[in-house]
């Protein structure tokens, strides 16, 4: 067997560097902004359990599969799928999976950047003391006025996209590793401190009850789909991001172990965010299902009244912006990688081109919070359509395709060799999950939702 071609982008310097970068891709707005608000909208406890089950049974096996495909293919998702389908003697059209991923990644980034822009703006609001002593109504008004202003949102979205393009232009190993190395531990420390604060609030037990109480009556077919979509979103699966990161992975690293570590850290961060936010929601009698503004309407209340709130507030939003940045670079990387490898443009140019497309698309999301808030398609705003289409349709389809390819198309001798698990039984477990459980689960959830329509 010949050694796989070395990636032209350089490689991660060590196993921990890959874990850090992939964790950086996974941990982001999905955990801290999205998880709490969709949990709020979908009734709490039962939704959380379904989400965690999806992470364990579908997410982890697919993460292993996607990393494995990337490491074996060694290039951008389109090319990787071309190479691997040839090797597996499968249909050439598998490379459309790469296209799905690149398109999905940019669509997601277009709204991701807008929300990351909100977080950036909140760094300054925290810094200039806007939350100090503010009550629930003041914090709500602050948020409403902010998202009501297209110019402000455009400004912050532009800034965030520029930062993303700048970092990506410098390449994956320059800076990316270092920033995540500082970022992840700080995020954990800060979240732990905030959990301690949440424990002192009067709504703590109510919040915990909401988050962990298993009332399956609240679960609809659609919330099953949303929980599954969130598992894909939060782990960053199905769009070729994990695949390109896998392409930079040296040979001697256990993909399975790394995937389990990443998924565990990712779920922990989401749960911690929930444990912090829901007690604040109930203490101040807010509505858990208030939507995408949830963290921006709850956390500032805490920062405005707690000791050290100024410092915690600034730190929290700074870390959130960095966590969003390390996910944004993962979302754009497949396209940049493809432009460089297949179109022969320079890395700088590739960043500029894909960044510009994403930036323009972002205007749709910006306007759905103000100028176009009444423009609805099937009762949803532009942002909501984009979110539903990507998270709940494109990601599961991408994940399903990865599972089918890795489980059914790829030769077992190749996947076994690539995964190189010390215990043959572990390989069998993975194979079972990826061949039967993951595809069946995705399929059944889709079927259930179609039936419910
Ligand atoms: N996982 C990131 C978050 O939770 C976002 C993200 C990165 C992502 N890469 C992705 C979402 C690929 C979907 C697909 O914030």
Image (spheres, rainbow, N blue to C red):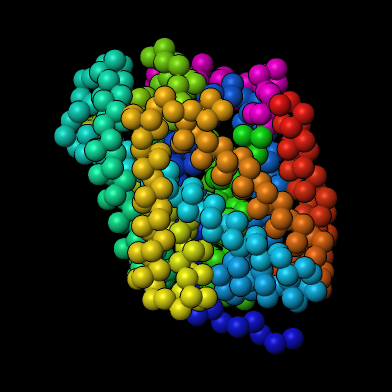
On screen, 165 above or below 73? above
Quadrant of the snapshot with the N terminus: bottom right
Q: Residue at x 64, y 82 (%)?
A: 4
- Residue 98 screen position, x and y as percent: 61, 62
Q: Main secondary structure of the magenta part?
A: helix
Q: Decide if residue 416 is in sight here.
A: no
Magenta includes 202? yes
Residue at 82% across, 61% down = 408
- Tally of marks: 0
Q: Residue at x 63, y 42 (%)?
A: 393
Residue 5, quarter of picture = bottom right
Q: Is residue 427 above or below residue 110?
A: below
Q: Quadrant of the C terminus?
A: top right
Residue extending farthest left: 128
Residue at coordinates 49% horizontally, 49% vertically from top-left?
107
Work out which residue is located at the far top of the displayed protein and give it: 285
Q: Position of residue 289 (x, y in %)?
A: 49, 21
Q: Is residue 308 above or below residue 434?
A: above
Residue 81 visible in the shown view? yes
The magenta segment is 199-224
Q: Is residue 109 rendered to the left or right of residue 229?
A: left
In-front residue for pair 264/123: 123
In x, y percent, where is residue 261? 59, 54
Q: Quarter of the image holding residue 411? A: bottom right
Residue 200 highlighted magenta (yes or no):
yes
Image position of 259 with respect to 13: above or below: above
**Residue 204 appears at what percent x and percent y?**
46, 19
- Which is more toward the observer, 331 or 177? 331
């Amino acid at each position: 067997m010949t050694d796989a071609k070395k990636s032209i982008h350089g490689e991660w310097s060590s196993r921990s560097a890959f874990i850090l970068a992939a964790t950086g891709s996974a941990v982001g707005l999905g955990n801290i902004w999205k998880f709490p608000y969709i949990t709020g909208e979908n009734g709490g406890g039962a939704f959380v359990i379904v989400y965690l089950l999806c992470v364990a049974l579908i997410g982890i096996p697919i993460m292993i599969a996607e990393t494995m495909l990337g490491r074996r293919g060694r290039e951008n998702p389109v090319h990787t799928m071309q190479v691997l389908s040839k090797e597996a003697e499968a249909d050439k059209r598998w490379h459309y999976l790469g296209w799905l991923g690149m398109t999905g990644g940019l669509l997601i980034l277009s709204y991701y950047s807008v929300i990351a822009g909100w977080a950036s703006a909140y760094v300054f609001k925290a810094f200039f003391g806007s939350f100090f002593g503010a009550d629930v109504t003041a914090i709500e008004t602050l948020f409403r006025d902010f998202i009501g202003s297209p110019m402000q949102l455009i400004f912050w979205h532009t800034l965030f996209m520029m930062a993303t393009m700048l970092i990506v232009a410098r390449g994956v190993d320059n800076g990316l590793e270092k920033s995540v190395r500082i970022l992840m531990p700080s995020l954990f420390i800060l979240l732990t401190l905030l959990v301690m604060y949440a424990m002192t609030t009067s709504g703590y037990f109510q919040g915990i009850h909401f988050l962990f109480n298993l009332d399956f009556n609240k679960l609809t077919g659609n919330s099953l789909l949303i929980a599954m979509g969130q598992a894909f979103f939060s782990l960053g699966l199905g769009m070729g991001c994990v695949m390109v990161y896998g392409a930079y992975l040296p040979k001697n690293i256990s993909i399975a172990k790394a995937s389990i570590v990443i998924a565990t850290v990712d779920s922990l961060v989401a749960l911690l965010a929930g444990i912090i936010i829901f007690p604040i929601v109930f203490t101040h009698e807010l509505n858990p299902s208030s939507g995408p503004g949830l963290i921006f309407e709850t956390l500032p209340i805490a920062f405005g009244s707690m000791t050290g709130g100024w410092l915690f507030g600034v730190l929290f939003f700074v870390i959130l912006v960095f966590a969003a940045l390390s996910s944004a670079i993962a979302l754009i990387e497949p396209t940049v990688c493809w432009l460089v490898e297949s179109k022969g443009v320079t890395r700088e140019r590739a960043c500029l081109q894909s960044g510009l497309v994403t930036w323009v698309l972002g205007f749709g999301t910006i306007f759905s919070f103000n100028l176009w808030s009444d423009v609805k398609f099937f009762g949803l705003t532009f942002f909501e359509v984009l979110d539903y289409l990507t998270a709940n349709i494109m990601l599961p389809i991408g994940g399903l395709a990865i599972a089918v390819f890795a489980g059914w198309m790829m030769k077992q001798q190749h996947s076994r060799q690539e995964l190189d698990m010390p215990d043959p039984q572990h390989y069998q477990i993975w194979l079972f999950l990826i061949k039967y459980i993951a595809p069946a689960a995705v399929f059944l959830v889709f079927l259930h939702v179609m039936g419910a329509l």
